[in-house]
Amino acid sequence: MSDLKNHFGDDASLDEEDTQNILNFLLENSAEKSTKEASVKVLNSIKNKDIIAITQTSFWKKEHKNIPKEIFKNSEVKTKANCSACHMDIEKGLIEDDKIKDINSFM
């Protein structure tokens, strides 16, 4: 949030009020404040590393190691970062096993 002019190669600058509102939301809803199992496991897998993508964590890699690479090339999935393609409850901040789509539908 401190360098939105250079946000992954794009200028995502916002006015000060919006920046502060988003920063407050991110801090209040961060994994550090969550008691959800997945949040704790992601944090534990990050440790002191400077990782900004969940797909680069050892937890994510372990959980997704048996998923064929072709799944992530499917037009409905497109990228490893598209969590909602498979995790139906991700918008609520949840990753429940019974809410994961059958990956065979993407093959």
Image (tube, helix red, strand yellow):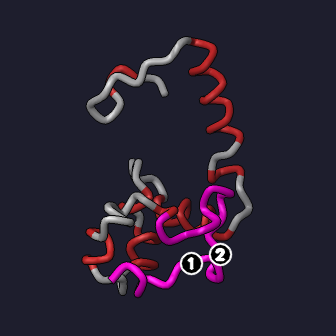
Q: CA distance from mark 1 to mark 2?
A: 7 Å
Q: Residues within 10 Å of mark 1 (few under 14, many from 20)?
A: some
Residue denoted by label 2: 96
Q: Vertical placement of 26 versus 79: above or below?
A: above
Magenta segment: does it hold 88? Answer: yes
Identify the residue at horizontal 67%, vertical 70% (top origin).
Answer: 37
Instruction: Pick the quarter of the image with the C terminus.
Output: bottom left
Q: Which residues are magenta?
A: 85-107
Identify the residue at horizontal 36%, vertical 20% (top origin).
Answer: 5
Magenta segment: does it hold 91? Answer: yes
| Residue 77 image offset from top left, x and y in percent | 37, 65
Q: Vertical placement of 78 versus 4: above or below?
A: below
Residues at marks 1 and 2 touching, judged by CB atoms closer than 8 Å: yes
| Residue 43 image offset from top left, x and y in percent | 55, 60
Residue denoted by label 1: 100
Q: Which mark is residue 3?
A: none
Viewer-side residue, 73 vs 55: 73
| Residue 70 image offset from top left, x and y in percent | 25, 77
SS for callout 1: loop
Identify the residue at horizontal 44%, vertical 58% (top origin).
Answer: 54
Q: Amino acid at mark 1?
A: Ile
Query: In the figure, residue 99 lies in which quadrant?
Result: bottom right
Q: Residues within 10 Å of mark 2 (few under 14, many from 20)?
A: few
Identify the residue at horizontal 30%, vertical 70% (top origin).
Answer: 74
